Amino acid sequence: MCVKKWFPFIGTMVIVGCGAILHYSLSLSGMAAWSFIVSSVNGSAWELYKPVGIVYIFWIVIELSYLRPSLMHFVCSKVVGMYVLCLTALAVGIAVQPLHEVFSEMHFWIVALVSVSSAQMTGYGIYRSDVKIEILYVPLLLSILCMVFMLLFLSFYPPHWIIFTEK
């Protein structure tokens, strides 16, 4: 059995599982200072995205080192997947937010499974296709640096927008 064929599925499970550990790390660590950066502080859509977004970035590095794919095409497809992850997590997080009282524990799992699955399928689909996404290499690489900056900066200084507040 070829492990490379199963990497999108394995990646989805690892990202959601490790994202869950980060999601609950605030309470698991006894409110340690480091956990405010990586965990969900409230039930807002951004805070639901943050743990899986961080793990997704690390998973890209793991895939790069194990699969050794065509670098530019792979990185571009994964960065597009990262933005699909972000947009899907924010959209599903906002859509599911009114049901937060009913599904308080399932809220994160719904957002994580839907967004990570869609990101993995998009990234894998673009990578396996003949789309010439490499022409966007530099803008996509710069945009991933912007995403990392946002993950760090917006953890400490979130604006008062709907994606950053819990209803």
Image: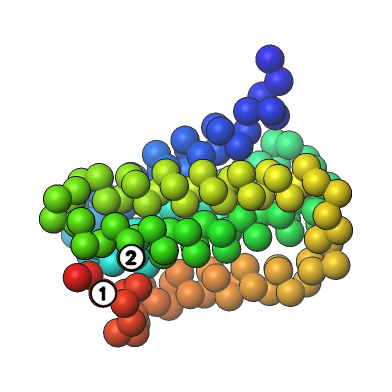
Q: Mark 1: which secondary structure?
A: loop
Relative horizontal placement of residue 49, taking residue 133 as reference (left or right): left
Q: Residue at x 41, y 64 (%)?
A: 90
In the image: residue 110, left or right of residue 66: left
* Residue 27 or residue 56, whichever sits in front: 56
Q: In whole angstroms, how far apart are the C-alphas of marks 2 and 1?
A: 10 Å
Looking at the image, residue 100 lies above or below residue 16? below
Q: Amino acid at mark 1?
A: Thr
Of 67 and 104, nearer the camera is 104
**Number of marks in picture:** 2
Residue 30 in view, yes or no: no
Residue 75 at x, y percent in the picture: 73, 56
Q: Amino acid at mark 2?
A: Ile
Residue at the farthest top position: 1
The residue beneath circle 1 is 165
Question: Helix or strand or loop: what does disc 2 sit on?
Answer: helix
Image quarter where the C terminus lies is bottom left
Q: Quadrant of residue 17?
A: top left
Q: Position of residue 19 (x, y in %)?
A: 39, 48
Which residue is drawn at the image coordinates 79% and 66% (left, top)? 137
For image coordinates 56% across by 55% down, the residue present is 57
Does 4 sit left or right of 150 as displayed?
Answer: right
Which residue position holds label 2? Answer: 94
> Would you say residue 91 is visible in this rendering?
yes
